Image: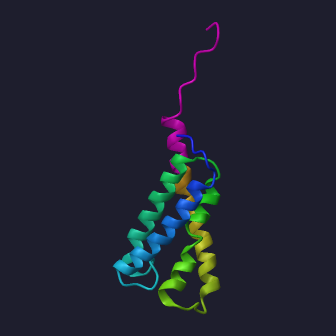
Amino acid sequence: MAVKNKYIVPVILALCGFAAWLLISSAFNLREAWDGPGFAPYFILMLMMNAAAGFIEPEKIIRKGILSVSLQPLAIFVISGEIGSLFPLGLIAFLALGLFFSAAGGAGAFIKKKFFAPESPPPPGG
């Protein structure tokens, strides 16, 4: 599947990450989606989104992983209405998570290239 606009997948991924944070935080009544019972749904959802993005567009996987969490600090501000004293540490955690989620994007890209790549025609004269 060829994506015509190179910005559409990263933008959708960032918006989905923002929405995932808000939905999980609201569903479990948490300030941060990765707290307590929100831990498993948050990580599973983010891994699945990044794997799908890697499958759809297998280029620039690390950038997509980081973009998937790029709007989540904004979601924390929207939910709490303040920036806490641990906010800089949270940004470092988001960077680490983005790199971790990039691995799922890499897995999606690998699956696409390995199992869904178009077969090459036989060599001429062969």
Magenta range is: 107-126
User: Is residue 40 or residue 48 the one in the foreground?
Assistant: 48
User: Is residue 104 or residue 83 the one in the foreground?
Assistant: 83
Q: What is the quadrant of the C terminus in the image?
A: top right
**Residue 56 appears at what percent x and percent y?**
52, 47
Residue 64 sits above or below residue 95 on the image: above
Residue shown at 47% from the left, 85% from the top: 79
Q: Is 4 left or right of 22, judged from the image as shown? A: right
- Residue 92 appears in the picture as rendered: yes
**Residue 34 appears at what percent x and percent y?**
45, 77
Residue shown at 57% from the left, 23% from the top: 120
Residue shown at 53% from the left, 33% from the top: 117
Picture quadrant of residue 39: bottom left
Residue 114 part of the magenta-drawn span: yes
Residue 25 part of the magenta-drawn span: no
- Residue 99 appears in the picture as rendered: no
